[in-house]
Image: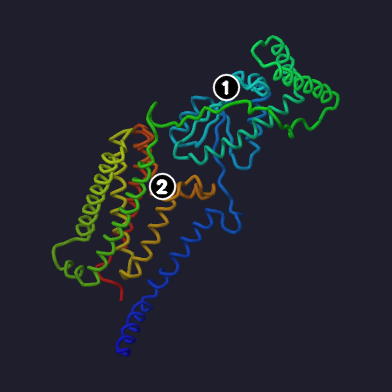
Amino acid sequence: MMIPFGALIRKDLRLFFSDRRAVTMSFVAPILIAAFFGYVFGGNGGKTETSKIQVLVADQDGSAISKAIAADLTASPSLEVKPSSLEEAREAVRKGKAGVAIVIPKEFGTEAGRAFFRPEKKPEIGVLYDPSHSAEQGMVQGILTGSVMQIVSKEMFGGTSGQKVVQETLSDLEKNQQMVPADKNSLRALLQGVETWNGRVKEREGAAGATGISGGLSVPYQIKAEAVTAKSGVQYNGYAHSFGGMSVQFILFMGIDVGIGMLLLRERGLWKRLRAAPLSRGMLLGSRAVSAALISMLILTVVFSVARVVFGVKIEGSMAGFIGVCVAFSLMTAAFGLLIAAIGKTAEATRGLAVLVTLIMVMLGGAWVPAFVFPQWLQKVTMLVPTRWAMDGLDAMTWRGLGFSAALGPIGVLLLCAVVFGALAVSRFQWEAEG
């Protein structure tokens, strides 16, 4: 019993190792994908170069405090800060060109100084953010809190405007009839101490200031966060991006099946027999491309219909743009499948390579992991990957709610890739497998 059993095992192992390309891809694919994710998420003890968060700062105040806050944010190693107007910042966030924008309102410096000692009324700093970048928003708000506390406290305990605020607050304190006497005495003592300290700082320029303040002081501002989506009152629907990503992934897998299916038909000699019939190369490849494109469109239609009915995903932008992106991606996928069939030698080896290429395209396209978490150099590389354009186009036409013009770029790139893949497939097409 054991002899036939062992013979069957040896037969399977010989079949596996007989195709060197298939064997190679069985080991290379998991190694490369694991290395990719390890690199992106801080492999090597977290020494990976991390991507800076794109932050726009609209300083409507122009005070010493607001300028110092902007400078402190710019010096942060985690942020890439650029000045902007409120209108430009809002539009950049809406289009996904920036993840977060900070809006410092007029009179913030003065009001923040007053709120530092009397928290009844706090000025607001606006934070506009892309809802698909909520993790970035939280990080930016944390850095912003530290910057504001450091800058405002330093100004209140040594700055020119701080001296003025302390004097005004002392004057207002004597007129306040609503504050509890004990609290008033404590605050008066604190302000008088600050006033004395400011006098000493003025005499000794370059003092460290109040980096170690503790006890009773309040964060001198509050954040007004706003998720910038397609329209006012429209909430971000995370299902829109996830359905787009999974559609892209599984349609590409369908393209692999088309290519592998054609290779299997060639191995069985069907292509050779078709050559004897009045069937041209263009007719054979063209029919497969059109059928694959139609299947892709059907998948996209069904998937997004379910997303609309069950999960409330809407086409907030241009419907024509959405259809255009879907058609262009379907044609690109069809050409990708033809290219697999044209350059592949055996179905087994080609499948492994095609799956690896597809997974890399899906990862770099942002279908699994948002592209903004990649290192900056890798974010630039992803612009060469068609799946990145497909994802950006689908996002733009769904939850971002952009117009048709925003779809022109993705449509153009996807159609260009379809032409290139198709031309390569035709040029490499062979009726019979290589010996």
| Residue at the limit of the structure toward the left, as seen here | 277
Callout 2 amino acid:
Arg
Left or right, residue 298 beside residue 145: left
Q: Nearer the viewer, mark 1 or mark 2?
A: 1
Callout 1 amino acid:
Pro
Identify which residue is drawn at 69% across, 29% down. 151
Report the quarter where the C terminus lies: bottom left
Residue 339, percent from left and from top: 32, 59
| The one of 100 and 310 positioned closer to us in this rendering | 310
Identify which residue is drawn at 25% across, 71% down. 432
The residue that label 1 is drawn on is 105
Query: Which mark is on residue 388?
Result: 2
**Residue 98, placed above or below residue 86:** below
| Residue 234 location, quadrant | top left
Residue 360, percent from left and from top: 42, 56
Q: Is residue 62 visible?
A: no
Q: Earlier in the sequence, mark 1 or mark 2?
A: 1
Query: Which colouring convention does the figure follow?
Result: rainbow
Residue 108, percent from left and from top: 61, 21
- Badge 2, how many Cα within 10 Å: few under 14, some, many 20+? many
- Badge 1, how many Cα within 10 Å: few under 14, some, many 20+? some
Q: Is residue 130 visible?
A: yes
| The one of 224 and 395 positioned closer to us in this rendering | 224
Identify which residue is drawn at 52% across, 40% down. 136
**Residue 176, placed above or below residue 385:** above
Report the quarter where the N terminus lies: bottom left
